[in-house]
Image (spheres, rainbow, N blue to C red):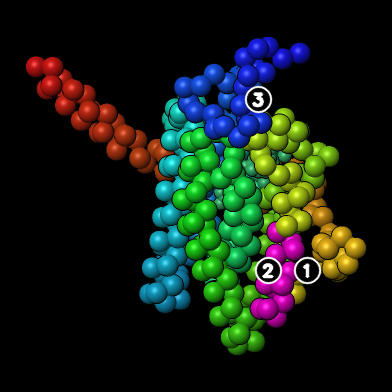
Amino acid sequence: EMSDDERHFQDKVDANIKVEPRDWMPDDYRKTLIRQIGQHAHSEIVGQLPEGNWITRAPTLERKAILLAKVQDEAGHGLYLYCAAETLGVTRDDLTEKLLSGRMKYSSIFNYPTLTWADMGAVGWLVDGAAIMNQVPLQRTSYGPYSRAMVRICKEESFHQRQGYAIMMKMAQGSAAQRKMAQDALNRMWYPSLMMFGPSDKDSVHSAQSMAWKIKINTNDELRQKFVNETVPQAEYLGLTIPDENLKFNEETGNYDFSQPDWDEFFEVLKGNGPCNTDRLNARRKAWDDGAWVREGLLAHAEKRAAAKVA
Ligand code: ACO
């Protein structure tokens, strides 16, 4: 049974009218958005770590400059998203504390290591590719500040995806050793990339309500299928093999049939037991602690200025 407020709210969402920060919204709509936008922001920030790992070891100055710019973009995405979450009445400090104490998640993908330079190609191509597949529809999400943040983020993500593919192309067309590195990166990143879209629809606890509220536009499985359909020809063009013996174009459905990732592994990673979970959180805790003096300095400065104005 919906209250009048809830009915009015749902009508508005159904009519594709954006919900803005001061509008009435159901508590669970607000909570779901804080969870999703907050996790998304954390993913952008934690997502800097696997690529940051290679900035000092990029093979050329040009590659270093590109990678540095890309990792900086991710920081920017995190900041837009924290701002979007703040319009819902939470503070960035609160979200950060929840991340650091393990009470909020970030994307499973960033708990995998980046072992070689080819991983910079595979991350850009597959991880940013999966991110765009998920985020382009989110430009039409019902919450105004989130949908507007997505517009710029998607433009930058598509540049990131292209730079990753450009690295893969160079490696795949390079020496036998480089081709081997490219194939190895694809082998390791493929299934973790498929996991980015979340559990299969039957296990997705939030999808039904989130889709009714147009927080989500597509189901997890729909987007995963779309990603596979788009990525297979890209792998073929590179001359690389997707590590899936069951991968096959299905004439009837017009989709590629493919193997599901190991969902037990996915849930283990979510519980904190992936290869890099501990490292990632330790790195973020260290950054937070090391930055304390900057935050304190800024606050002291703001207080001084406010006092000076009163005087
Ligand atoms: N990594 C970590 N946790 C995940 C992942 C994942 N890949 N997929 C799902 N989960 C979590 C959900 O957060 C949820 O847990 P919670 O209730 O504790 O929050 C649980 O698994 C069940 O999943 P769903 O019910 O399907 O959750 P939801 O409806 O939120 O769908 C999805 C998950 C598709 C990731 C959605 O939150 C989303 O679209 N988020 C915005 C995009 C995003 O966060 N991208 C980050 C990665 S890309 C990047 O930023 C570079």
Crowding at mark 3 (Cα within 10 Å: few <14, some 14-19, many 20+) = few
What's the magenta bit mostly, secondary-structure-wise? helix
Q: Which residue is mark 1?
A: 243
Between the residue at mark 1 and the residue at mark 2, the CA separation in whole angstroms equals 8 Å
In this rendering, would 250 be left or right of 300?
Answer: right
Q: Amino acid at mark 2?
A: Leu
Residue at the (41%, 55%) spot, across then down: 72
Q: x and y percent of residue 45 in the render?
A: 49, 46
The disc at residue 11 is 3
Image quarter in which the N terminus is found: top right
Nearer to us: label 1 or label 3: 3
Crowding at mark 2 (Cα within 10 Å: few <14, some 14-19, many 20+) = many
Residue at the (46%, 47%) spot, across then down: 77
Q: x and y percent of residue 158 in the render?
A: 53, 61
In this rendering, would 6 be left or right of 67?
Answer: right
Image quarter in which the C terminus is found: top left
- Residue with the most extreme left position: 311
Tell me which label, 1 or 3, sits earlier in the chain.
3
Q: Secondary structure at mark 3?
A: helix
Tell me which label, 1 or 2, sits earlier in the chain.
2
Question: Taking the image as drawn, is residue 198 in sight?
Answer: no
- Is residue 203 covered in magenta? no
Crowding at mark 1 (Cα within 10 Å: few <14, some 14-19, many 20+) = some
The disc at residue 186 is 2
From what the image shows, is residue 35 above or below residue 168? above
Residue at disc 3, CB closer than 8 Å to ligand 1: no
* Residue range corresponding to the magenta coloring: 227-240
Q: Secondary structure at mark 2?
A: helix
Q: Amino acid at mark 1?
A: Pro
From what the image shows, is residue 264 above or below residue 118? above
